[in-house]
Image (spheres, helix red, strand yellow):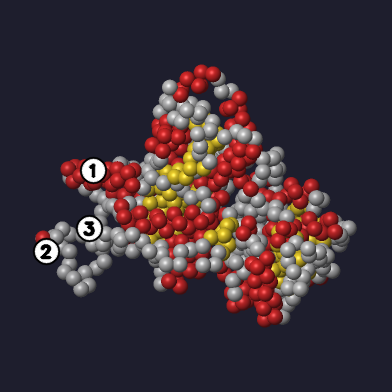
Amino acid sequence: MMQTPFPAFDKRVIIFAGAYGSGKTEVAVNYAIGLTTSQNQPVSIIDLDIVNPYFRSREAAFELETQGVRVIMPHNEMCHADLPIILPEIRGEIERSDGKVVVDVGGDDVGARVLSSMVDAFAPKGYEFLIVLNARRPFTSDVAGSLKMMHDIEMSSRLKFTGIVSNTHLIGETTTEIVVEGYRLAEEVGKAAEIPVVFVSVVTEVAQQLDPNVVKVPVFALSRQMLKPWEEKVKAVRGL
Amino acid sequence: MTRILMKGNEAIAEAAIRAGAIYYFAYPITPQNEVGEYMARRLPEVGGVFVQAESEVAVGNMLFGAVASGKRAFTSSSSPGISLMQEAISYMAGARLPVVLINIMRGGPGLGGILPSQADYFQATKGGGHGDYRVLVLAPSTLQEAVDLTMLAFHLADKYCNPTMVLADGMIGQMMEPVEFPENYVEEPLPPKDWATTGCQGRDPNVVNAKGRAPIIIKSLALDPVVLEKNNLVLAEKYKLMKRDEVRFEAYKINPKNRILVVSYGTMARICQTVIDELEQEEISIGLLRPITLFPFPAKEILAEAIKPNIESVLTVEMSMGQMVEDVEWAVKDKRPIEFYGRTGGIVPTPEEVKDYIMKILARETPAAKNWNG
């Protein structure tokens, strides 16, 4: 069984970006929860997804708040809107002096554009700008496609990526082979872009089976939060 | 073939391309925008054309022209957008044109909301626009099925020269699942599109009385009542054939011990499956019949299961105030009591709610109910 420490960063702001459907939200939500349990400091998560209508981190707000993570998301009925809502408290949250801030950005270059208006807020506090890659997604299945995606996101966000999160999976059909195949691609992309693979993320069941001699970076075990209605066992209705 | 992880909207878009669609007309609306984004990226690679229309009304009429040329064309939209296309859909049904429509349903009525719904069942299956016509309606419940049914939709549209719709709730459009596309897609042979308006390069123009052929003017206008009625009779004949040959459904855990027959479609059926699996653990036997074609509707098949001796009632579960349940009532007639459970507004019923409702039905079952067996 593979045990690796929580992949912590010194930087205050950790931004997850990537292609549509790369798994940014699942990683960001799990990462925020992981931070509160492993690091003794306040953690907040900013739902900055202005392009996706469903499966945004705000849907896990109840679970996040229960775990002690502060959730910054549009208020009241606006949390269901598909509008480019940028809350004034986002900037305040970034400029605050204590704790960690996790930012969940919308997909592709269009989703990342919103970051460009906040570069001056991120820069002085220090940030990690992480690209979440899933090699089983149509437009990031090879080095060229992944580099193009990174380039497009960097252009629209005016931020430079500092690391790669290898998040290759097929939801319920994920195997160690699929994870390793994605990790190898991430390493190649990292070499070409001259940035490190900072961690591999995958559901706990598969994480436990990974060989540390093959996957040489920390493995971050995910517990799925973005469930489909039929995947939820019969239980109390989750509050939003 | 490698299995890849796709969002439903992307999977449907890729399926359309694999089925040979080269024209796509659309106007953006949530929750199906990824179809357009994907087509904008992929269509140029296959030599296709995507026109973002000025409205859904324009989309409908662009489709009329494109499919009249004999090429495969389609659109995708969500509930209010599909409402705007109804006039053109009626025209295409009248003109006997093979068009494919994708409706990723959101909550209504009116502008409603952007969350999942199944409230366009009436609109899709009972016409939607004016006149005596039917749209062939396919309802996927998984992303792989969304791929397969989208490809099938193009085939069936051509086979019957009829508008064909893939009707899916917003969950199908937005969720992600692994899918694969057929390596070598081969269709059953289709009749030639000798009616298509392709220009007359290399052949004689199709003008009145030239070589005894009628002019090729694709239209739904017929001022002569005899001609118009004849067209309606042809359409009716076609719908009869669809009812005979195209009914599709899935039976889940249907067996003689079932006490309730659940009828549900799309992702709602998957929630019902979760409940049925749980109840099985508690030794309560429930079966599910999931219509895959909503028109033609598997009425005979539902009746056959409903009248099994142990069935106490038939429960329809929908993300609506009760639409398909009317077809279930019509199918079962007065042979069994009909129950309904639904949520609207974009609220997806939880497995817990559905289970509670089933338990309530089972608890209130009276001895008199047993007499329906005769």
**Residue A219: where, in percent of width, then height?**
76, 66
Which residue type does callout 3 highlight? Answer: Ile
**Residue B84: where, in percent of width, then height?**
42, 49
- Give the residue pinned by disc 3: B217
Assign a secondary structure to mark 2. helix
**Residue A217: where, in percent of width, then height?**
77, 71
Earlier along the polypeptide chain: callout 2 or callout 1?
A: 2
Q: Do marks 3 and 1 share a chain?
A: yes
Q: Say if B348 sits above or below A166 in the image.
A: above
Which residue type does callout 1 highlight? Answer: Leu
- Give the residue pinned by disc 2: B210
Residue that appears at 48% across and 50% down: B140
Q: Do the CB atoms of the residues marked 3 and 2 lie less than 8 Å apart?
A: no
Q: Say if B195 sits above or below B372 in the image.
A: below
Separation of residues labelled 2 and 1 (CA atoms): 28 Å
- Give the residue pinned by disc 1: B233
Q: Residues within 10 Å of mark 1 (few under 14, many from 20)?
A: few
Assign a secondary structure to mark 3. loop
Q: Do marks 3 and 2 share a chain?
A: yes
Separation of residues labelled 3 and 1 (CA atoms): 20 Å
Residue that appears at 38% across and 57% down: B154
Residue A145's disc number: none
